[in-house]
Image (cartoon, rainbow, N blue to C red):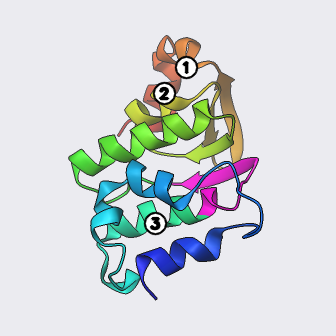
């Protein structure tokens, strides 16, 4: 299937326009627009991640869970994905973001949760978290 066909699969109701459109998705990710008629299977890892986010948004979710969206991506693409996630959050869609890159997570998050050994070991705002070097050093730094 092509990129465009994959996007069409995500549309919740073809009879009623949703909050997001295929054109908006292609505007958000110019890489996908350039490859809209290509087979989705030949996309790079970053482009596949973009396609997954777009297809999800076309279903008009109230909440999306995004697990490690920047893992293995080039720095330029990491920035682009971060910008899009921030835009999605501003649109009113709730996001549960699982991310190891603190710069992305702190830019987007309203709340920060740190898990250690399966338990929540910290919970607070990004501003509070920045002040907690003890939590960062114990649970997040190598």
**In the image, residue 80 lies at what x, y percent?**
33, 44
Residue drawn at (53%, 59%) of the image: 53
Q: Nearer the viewer, residue 19 or 87?
A: 19
Query: Mark 1 Cα within 10 Å, few/some/many (few <14, many 20+)?
Result: some
Q: Is residue 68 visible?
A: no
Q: Which residue is mark 1?
A: 126
> Residue 20 appears at what percent x and percent y?
61, 51
Q: Which residues are magenta?
A: 56-68
Question: Does label 3 or label 1 sit earlier along the sequence?
Answer: 3
Give percent across and percent down for residue 64. 67, 52
What residue would you read off at disc 3? 51
Quadrant of the drawing holding the C terminus: top left
Q: CA distance from mark 3 to mark 1?
A: 28 Å
Residue 129, by quadrant, is top right
**CB atoms of marks 2 and 1 within 8 Å:** yes
77 vs 104, nearest the viewer? 77
Would you name the residue on which mark 2 appears? 106
Q: Residues within 10 Å of mark 2 (few under 14, many from 20)?
A: some
In space, the residues marked 2 and 3 are separated at their CA atoms by 24 Å
Is there any visible trace of residue 82 in the rendered image? Answer: yes
x, y percent for residue 106: 48, 27
Residue at 31%, 76% (x, y): give it: 43
The quadrant where residue 10 appears: bottom right
């Amino acid at each position: 299937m092509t990129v465009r066909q994959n996007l069409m699969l995500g549309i919740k109701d073809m009879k009623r326009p949703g909050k997001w459109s295929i054109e908006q998705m292609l505007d958000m990710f110019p890489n996908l627009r350039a490859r809209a008629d290509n087979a989705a299977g030949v996309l790079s890892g970053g482009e596949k991640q973009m396609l997954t986010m777009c297809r999800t948004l076309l279903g008009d979710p109230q909440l999306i869970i995004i697990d490690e969206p920047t893992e293995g991506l080039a720095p330029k693409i990491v920035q682009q994905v971060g910008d899009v996630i921030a835009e999605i959050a501003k649109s009113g869609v709730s996001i549960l973001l699982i991310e190891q890159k603190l710069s992305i997570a702190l830019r987007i998050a309203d709340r920060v949760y740190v898990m250690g050994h399966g338990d929540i070991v910290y919970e607070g705002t990004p501003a509070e978290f920045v002040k907690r070097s003890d939590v960062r050093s114990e649970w997040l730094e190598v």
